[in-house]
Amino acid sequence: MTEKLRAMTSIWSNPVVVRDMRVRLRGPRAFWNQALYLGVLSLIALAGYAAAISASGSAVDPIQIQQSLATFYFFIFLTVAGLILLIAPALTAASVVFERQRLTLDLLVTSPMTSLQMLTGKLVSSVAFLLLLLSLSIPASALCVMLGGATIGDVFRIYVLLATDGIVLAAIGLLFSCTTKNSVQAISGTYGAVILFAILTFVIGQTVEVSGVASHMRGAGAAPAPPLSALVALNPFIAVTLTNFNVILIGASVPLWLVTAVFAVLIVRLLMTASALRLGLYEQGLVGSLRRQALLITAATAFPTGQWVATTTGLPSDLSVFFSVIGIGVGAFCVGSFFFPSLFVPVVDEEAPVLATIKHSYNLRAAFSKDHAGALPFFHIWLLVTLVAAALGVALPEGTVASYVSMGMPHMGVPAKVTLIVLAIAVLTSFTYLSAAGYLLWCIARRAATFCPSYTMARPITYVIFVFIVAAPFAVMAVASQLRNDFTDVFSSPFNVLWLGFPFSDMAMNGRPWVERISPFAWTSALAYALGTLIYSPWLPVTPGIAAFARRKVPA
């Protein structure tokens, strides 16, 4: 039995769970906090009920009365969602930081528990308290059932979604608690990430028109939700409006709350592994596990994204198939670019000698190990997984694989084999273009590590230089258009060919068939590879942080 399996089978006997629950519920403070929570919720429930009654007035129309009760139902659970969004991250944001400040973390580290077992105990104790707070809201939700504003099934599903979202938010707080050194940084970083997460999911929800689907309310004949709405439902506010919807995945109708729970399990597991890695205990296998989980989440996100693009655009031609795959790949690269400096900046262990060098640059077998030679290979594997999953999502908007291959795609007017060829070309073109951009970022990171005194300084400098290289030609093009007094034709500048965004410019796209639009991607890829090789020669060994290593004492 593995360590992870032992951690899951002995969750409630975990000494960290028992200790934290005793500390959290010891004394009258915990009960006063629960009483305050219940009092605030009761006042809000009474206010919502009064508002619903005043809205219905003296109407005797059953439809109007039912709408008022449904409004009261949403009002209650939107309030609970807001409380979950505020409370869940705070339960874990400073849990590990407090252990450091009380000088008790060393006692936990020296115990027989692994870091994952210890962090699992921290998360479970926080989630148990969160479930206790959710249970306190049952009387308010029972009022909705008694008045006819919702069914028991509705309440059960919404509690499952809210509990799932609360676990994800608590895992985010645990990650920042393991990353930062003091409680102020942990709490501010946690709530900053939670706010960004809420905004991002809201924007995605508006993009995939989740709000438009939710406007059908909870009727039995409501249309299926877009596939990405299962990921968007990790936002507690959006989850309240999506409890009764289903998601269509490869022709099968799956309850949305079930798919959201699967996403939550994958995300929580990834955050827990990242937290254990950031805790700094240097346990074996954490890096490989983290990278494999990242690939799994990437595939699980890219596939429904491609499916949504296919069903939204209707794929009127092979041109939309081609650029849908490229667009998803570029979007994934832009999101992942925030994490690439941490992946690409070389790191040498503390036991390494002064002026230690990293001699290897590329080793495919090290892609799932902490050896830095596997950083660029892992990026290539991640990119390929993203593009293949997105291509499958585009190719299979409806039906199963067998029906797709046998029937083709009649709504496109082209055989399935032609579409498969177009998808293969799109994946190859996207991979070449984005791998060149990643190679350029990798070269910048390795060069920055040779000058910066610390890795924490090399990583932001790497990202700033990369953004400058990407944006500087566009700024030159804008200045050139101003000198010509032609503000409408920025992309006709001769500097266009030096810009990494050249394949998406008007000059490269307008009035050209999709086959001819492939050549700008090839030119831009060659430019990125040449520029990266000019910045850093991959055949030379890297000496990370020369200034930092020079200040270190030589071990005896």
Image (cartoon, rainbow, N blue to C red):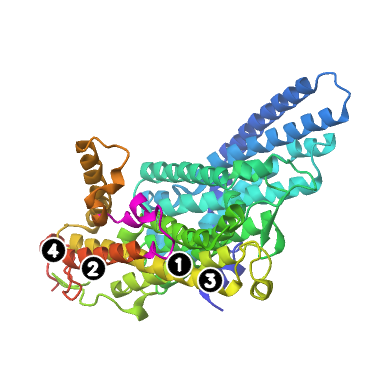
User: Mark 1 vs mark 3: which is more N-terminal?
Assistant: 3
User: In terms of depth relative to the viewer, which is nearer, 316 or 431?
Assistant: 316
Residue at the disc numbered 2: 350
Kindly identify which residue carries mark 4.
546
Q: Which mark is residue 151?
A: none
User: Which mark is first along the chain, 2 or 3?
Assistant: 3
Residue lying at 52% horizontally and 43% vertically, measured from the top left: 203
Nearer to us in this view, 463 or 408? 408
Residue 145 visible in the snapshot: yes
Identify the residue under disc 3: 4
- Determine whether label 3 and label 2 are within 8 Å by CB: no
From the viewer's perspective, tell me whether residue 414 is left or right of residue 68: left
Circle 1 SS class: helix
Q: Position of residue 163 (x, y in %)?
A: 63, 50
Looking at the rendering, the stretch of residues picked out in magenta corresponds to 499-518
Could you classify mark 4 by the number of other residues whose Cα lies within 10 Å: few (under 14), some (14-19), or many (20 or more)?
some
Task: Tell whether label 4 touches label 1 (CB within 8 Å).
Answer: no
Residue at 17% across / 63% down in the picture?
535
Compared with 455, 27 (above or below) is above
The answer to whether the residues at label 1 and label 2 have Cβ atoms under 8 Å apart is no
Task: Give the overall secondary structure of the magenta segment.
Answer: loop
Report which residue position mark 1 lands on: 426
Label 2: state its secondary structure: loop
Q: Is residue 463 left or right of residue 14?
A: left
Query: Hey, what amino acid is under mark 2?
Result: Glu
